[in-house]
Amino acid sequence: MAWNADLYKEKHAFVFQYGNSVVEWLEPKEGEKILDLGCGTGELTAQIAASGAQVTGIDSSVSMIANAKQHFPDIRFVVADATSFTLPGKFDAVFSNATLHWIRQKEKVLDRIHQHLVPGGRLVLEMGGKGNVDDIMGALEKAMKNHGYTFKPFWYFPSVGEYTSLLEEYDFRVNQVQYFDRETELADPENGIVEWLRMFGDNLMEEVPTTELDTILHEAQELLRATNFRNGKWFTKYVRLRVKAQRIEPVVTDL
């Protein structure tokens, strides 16, 4: 996924703005070592650092990290893949907002997180949950089929049971879970759905030629006008899964 950091901040800042309440779940403390996994342009990383914690932000996007370094030069940012990163030392906490649903290799990510947490260290995350943006996906799938293209979803939006069970497999104790709807206003009043898809949906439309892309995007948007457009604004249905968990050591007993 090639990210446009400027477009992300200009029209989709709600992603990190909604993350403010996830930081409240984290409760960062002065002197703690915290990893922000999927830090994007660094706004939430900076918010965590303001608590006095020592924060490292990682993201696979070169443009996102460059933007973060430019705006928050006193914070350590690293280009790294969530499925394979290796950093020196261990962290008291790992924080992640709106990142983990982008990564299909979820087991590899949890292995890396587990390896980088101290025993008893906490994991606080928010990601898309089951049903997230089903409205947009349904409209895009119909528009693509109308033009002879196959819709291939690539995100990972798990249910509560699916993801908490996976965490337990990786020796995490789940302490708190919230699964909730969050209707989200899109920034562009004229083409909110189109701009959302241009920002986040490139991978869905790889096989669509540039000459047909605009037509398909606007057709998908029109399919949603009756339900997702009101009072001059576009909205979409976000469904979020928020989790607070703790790394535990498996109990070994002599038999």
Image (spheres, rainbow, N blue to C red):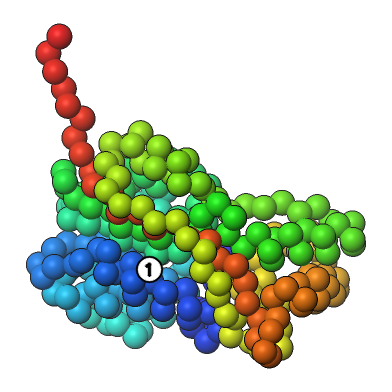
Residue 225, image quadrant:
bottom right
Image height check: is 4 above or below 140? below
Given the image, on which type of amino acid does mark 1 rest? Answer: Cys
Q: Secondary structure at mark 1?
A: loop
Query: 146 or 37, which lies in front?
Result: 146
Indicate the position of residue 13 as horizontal and vertical percent values: 48, 81
For the view shown, which residue lies furthest in the left direction? 31
For the view shown, which residue lies furthest in the right direction? 147
Residue 27, image quadrant:
bottom left
- The answer to whether 3 appears left or right of 91 in the picture is right
- The answer to whether 63 appears left or right of 2 in the picture is left
- Total labels: the figure holds 1
- The crowding category of the residue bearing disc 1, from other C-alpha atoms within 10 Å (few below 14, some 14 to 19, many at least 20), is many
Quadrant in which the C terminus appears: top left
Residue 204, image quadrant:
bottom right
Is residue 115 visible in the rendered structure shown here? no
The residue under the point 21% across, 30% down is 250
Query: 232 or 141, which lies in front?
Result: 232
For the view shown, which residue lies furthest in the top direction? 255
Is residue 211 visible in the rendered structure shown here? yes
Indicate the position of residue 251 as horizontal and vertical percent values: 17, 26
Quadrant in which the N terminus appears: bottom right
Q: Which residue is mark 1?
A: 39
